[in-house]
């Protein structure tokens, strides 16, 4: 109970310090969210935190849709953890292609060494734009994410450092556009894209632009 109250107080404090931002998670339950393609328990709420359990996952989307926005949240990975933030996403289809996935990955873990492309590292616009690496904290520690989507411009910060500043219109290869039609979407749902590993989220808030 004390941890929940502390989380609620922190969320209220953040809202007061961030004019225009609205909390997407109330710290108690998943009201305002919808689970698509859930596995096992899907996502659960524990001590004011959204938890994707190792035996759960699927896509947890906001019921509302967003076009241009600033999204701020904190995430914590388990060793080898793999998740993602879906933006401008449809409810159906593979979000990494039909929408956009901003990767969340413990990419320094042994299981990924030599097995992932540059545009699959944490912070990347999955399979499209690679992120600068080396700014994510180790598994078990909280990271701050800020994702700004304004028109075709995507700006991503992790722990206060810009790791991507890109223009989706720079993607002109027909093969890539055909593979990733989602980069041309103007709006959609925001959500978490679980892959059967433990990943936690808190202080999820958004500011429409």
Image: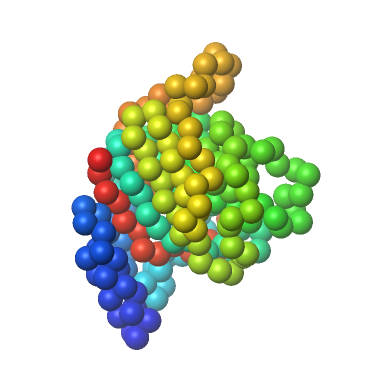
Q: Quadrant of the C terminus?
A: top left
Depicted 3 relative to depicted 70: above or below: below
In the image, farthest residue toward the bottom: 2
Left-right relation of 155 to 80: left
Residue found 63% across the figure and 48% down from its top:
133
Q: At 51% across and 26% down in the image, what residue appears? A: 180
**Residue in the foreground of this view, choosing between 201 and 137:** 137
Locate residue 197: give its quadrant: bottom right
* Image coords of residue 141 (percent x, y): 55, 69
* Of the pair 12 and 194, the residue shown nearer to us: 12
Relative horizontal placement of residue 156, taking residue 18 as reference (left or right): right
Image height of 208 relative to 142, above or below:
above
Check the image and name the residue furthest to the top.
Answer: 174
Where's residue 2, x and y in %?
Answer: 34, 86
Identify which residue is drawn at 59% across, 55% down: 135
Q: Residue 5 appears in which quarter of the rendering?
A: bottom left
97 up-or-down from 26: above or below: above
Instruction: Give the image location of residue 132, x and y in percent.
Output: 60, 44
Q: In the image, residue 52 lies at what x, y percent?
A: 49, 61
């Amino acid at each position: 109970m004390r941890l929940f109250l502390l989380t609620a107080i922190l969320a209220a404090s953040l809202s007061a310090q961030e004019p225009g931002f609205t909390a997407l998670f109330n710290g108690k339950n998943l009201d305002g969210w919808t689970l698509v393609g859930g596995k096992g328990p899907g996502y659960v709420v524990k001590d004011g935190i959204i938890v994707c359990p190792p035996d759960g996952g699927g896509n947890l989307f906001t019921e509302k849709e967003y076009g241009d926005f600033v999204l701020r949240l904190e995430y914590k990975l388990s060793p080898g953890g793999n998740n993602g933030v879906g933006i401008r996403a449809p409810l159906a289809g593979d979000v990494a292609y039909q929408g956009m996935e901003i990767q969340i990955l413990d990419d320094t873990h042994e299981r990924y060494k030599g097995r992932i492309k540059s545009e699959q590292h944490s912070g990347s616009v999955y399979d499209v734009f690679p992120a600068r690496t080396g700014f994510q904290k180790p598994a078990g520690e909280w990271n701050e994410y800020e994702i700004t989507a304004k028109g075709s411009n995507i700006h991503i910060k992790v722990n206060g450092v810009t790791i991507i500043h890109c223009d989706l219109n720079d993607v002109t290869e027909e093969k890539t556009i055909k593979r990733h039609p989602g980069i041309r979407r103007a709006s959609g749902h925001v959500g978490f894209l679980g892959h059967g590993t433990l990943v936690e989220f808190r202080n999820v808030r958004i500011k429409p632009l």
